[in-house]
Image (cartoon, rainbow, N blue to C red):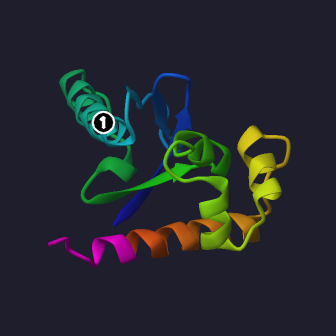
Amino acid sequence: MNKLTVIIESAPNNFGAYIKEIDGITAIGYTLLEMKQKIEEAIAVYKEIHEEDGYDIPELLKGDYQLIFKLDVKSFLEVYSGILTKAGLERLTGINQKQLWHYANGSVTPRKKQVEKIQNAVHQFGEELCSVEFC
């Protein structure tokens, strides 16, 4: 199965996305979920137009493929700032609030190890939330 990397970028009022491996496929959405739906629609339109106009469809889009969505730490912290506080993220990740603030405002780019630490903590938190039901 081919893997396609969808790079997500946040803007003040929406999200933009493009496929790293294939030029010409882009999408915009007001939420992450909408943007994901729009990029899938953009792929379908791209394939349809290429077929109609007699152009070759890139090998990566033939058969099954998986979309891997990538969002940088700065954008993540910005998007979820009203939901996940720096104090809460410090408890989840073990990274102090001041360092998280530097990542959020873009004055410091986190090292790969820090990115993984944030990602793993957020994913674990998400799994914990998904594992419970309310009564």
> Which quadrant would residue 88 be assigned to in this image?
bottom right
Q: Position of residue 74 (x, y in %)?
A: 67, 45
Image quadrant containing the C terminus: bottom left
| Magenta span dominant secondary structure | loop
Span colored in magenta:
128-135
- Residue pointed to by mark 1: 34
**50 in relation to 68, above or below:** above
Circle 1 sits in a helix, a strand or a loop, which is it? Answer: helix
Q: Position of residue 106 (x, y in %)?
A: 78, 40
**109 in relation to 124, above or below:** above
Residues 19 and 56: in front is 19
The residue drawn where x is 56% and y is 73% is: 120
Residues 25 and 27: in front is 27
**89 in relation to 8, above or below:** below
The residue drawn where x is 57% and y is 44% is: 81
In the drawing, does residue 115 fall left or right of residue 31? right
Task: Determine if residue 116 is in view.
Answer: no
Image quadrant containing the N terminus: bottom left
Residues 90 and 31: in front is 90
The residue drawn where x is 41% and y is 68% is: 126
What residue type is disc 1 on? Answer: Glu
Task: Determine if residue 3 is in view.
Answer: yes
Farthest left residue in view:
135
What is the total number of numbered labels drawn onto the structure image? 1
The residue drawn where x is 56% and y is 26% is: 11
> Which quadrant would residue 113 be assigned to in this image?
bottom right
Task: Determine if the magenta segment contains residue 133.
Answer: yes
**72 in relation to 25, above or below:** below
- How many C-alpha atoms fall within 10 Å of the one at disc 1: few (<14), some, or many (≥20)? some
Q: Position of residue 23 (x, y in %)?
A: 49, 32
In the drawing, does residue 104 fall left or right of residue 29? right
